[in-house]
């Protein structure tokens, strides 16, 4: 995967994860189980995106 594609994936994962996390916080008031799954899944997705930032930082430029 090229660096540009990796950078797009990183931001999609971070913003998508944070969106799911916020949605889970609102849904948890009505359905605790579904809200918990959304919060957990969103948090994991955002953390994976943040970890990929470190991977991108260690990569060199595309040739």
Image (tube, grey):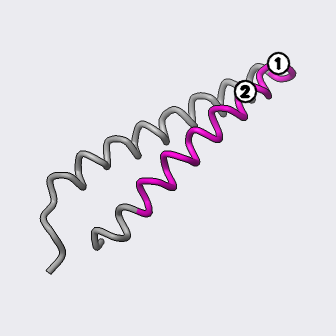
| Residue 29, horizontal then vertical, whole percent | 82, 18
Residue 61 placement (x, y as % from top left): 15, 70
Query: Which image quarter: residue 26?
Result: top right
The residue closer to the viewer here, 61 or 21, is 61
- Secondary structure at numbered mark 2: helix
First in sequence, mark 2 or 1: give its number.
1
Helix, strand or loop under label 1: loop
Q: Which residue is mark 1?
A: 29
Check the image and report above or below for 2 versus 22.
below
Residue 27 counted in the magenta span: yes
Residue span colored magenta: 8-31
Residue 13 bears which disc, if any?
Answer: none
Q: Position of residue 15 (x, y in %)?
A: 55, 47
- Quarter-wise, where is residue 31 in the image? top right
Image quadrant occupied by the N terminus: bottom left
Disc 2, disc 1: CB below 8 Å?
A: yes
Count all numbered tags in the image, as a single digit: 2
Magenta segment: does it hold 22?
A: yes
- Give the prevailing secondary structure in the magenta stretch: helix
Q: Residue at x 56, y 42 (%)?
A: 17
How crowded pointer 2 is (Cα within 10 Å; few <14, some 14-19, many 20+) is rated as many
Q: In the rendered view, would you say 59 is above or below 15?
A: below
The residue to which callout 2 is attached is 35
In this picture, residue 31 sits left or right of residue 60: right
Q: x and y percent of residue 41 in the render?
A: 57, 36
Looking at the picture, does residue 26 appear above or below residue 23? Answer: above
Rounded to the nearest whole Å, what is the CA distance between mark 2 and mark 1? Answer: 8 Å
Q: Residue furthest right?
A: 30
> Callout 1 environment at 10 Å: few (<14), some (14 to 19), or many (20+)?
few
Residue ID at (57%, 37%)? 42
């Amino acid at each position: 995967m090229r660096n540009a594609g990796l950078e797009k994936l990183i931001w999609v994962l971070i913003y998508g994860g944070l969106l799911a996390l916020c949605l889970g916080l609102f849904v948890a008031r009505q359905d605790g189980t579904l809200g918990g799954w959304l919060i957990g899944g969103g948090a994991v997705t955002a953390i994976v995106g943040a970890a990929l930032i470190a991977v991108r930082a260690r990569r060199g430029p595309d040739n």
